[in-house]
Amino acid sequence: FTQAAAAGDADALAHLGHMWANGIGVSPNNKTALALFHKAAEKGNARAIYGLGYMYLSGYGVARDVGKAVDFFTNAAEQGFADAQFHLGALYARGVVPVGDKKDHTNKGKGDAKGDTKGDKNTQAQKKDHAKAFYNFNLAAAQGHAVAQYNLGDMHRGGEGGPVDFAEARRLY
């Protein structure tokens, strides 16, 4: 990946960012990961944009900012990146998208989501939005995202975001 990244390949930059962020083959280094993610994101790479979202969501190497995380996840989700779609669904399911965020985040026509907002001075929780969670989980599940499939099954079982549908829940589990 190093040679391809040096040549400016966005996928290689994003993969190296992931490796540095998670300590895969190297000692974890958030500063290096962020720099690589930013370079790849400038080229429109969805994996890197998602990586930036996760860094902001978790506060790794940056101040935790759920609003920025949602913006990055939305950008990557609009490109069809399943992990970003899943995280948007999780944020909406837990009700942690910042108050005052007027963006649609359903990826129509154009947000691990830990959901813990304790101690986060920049974020206030809003009500859970099951319709947006359902929409984003559905997009990720359609691409085979296992945890999104499970969460979508739970939503079908509980009638959250749509009518109760035990058969669909069973299929998704």
Image (cartoon, rainbow, N blue to C red):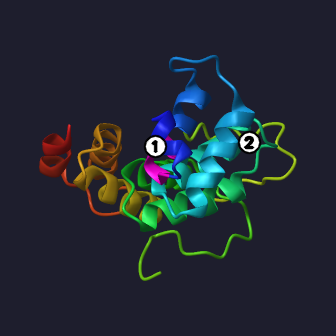
As helix, strand or loop, the secondary structure at mark 1 comes to helix
Highlighted range, magenta: 9-15
**Is the residue marked by circle 2 packed among few (<14), some (14-19), or many (20+) residues within 10 Å?**
some
Q: In which quadrant will I find the N terminus? A: top left
Percent from the top left, x then y, of residue 6?
55, 44
Front residue of 158/121: it is 121
Callout 1 amino acid: Ala
What is the spatial separation of the Cα atoms under label 2 and label 1, in whole angstroms?
A: 38 Å
Residue at the (43%, 55%) spot, across then down? 85
Does 60 lie within the magenta span?
A: no
By secondary structure, the bulk of the magenta-drawn segment is best described as helix
The mark lying in front, picked from 2 and 1, is 1
Is residue 51 in view from this perspective?
Answer: yes
Residue 128 placement: quadrant: bottom right
Question: Which mark is on residue 117?
Answer: 2
Callout 2 amino acid: Thr
Residue at the (53%, 35%) spot, across then down? 16
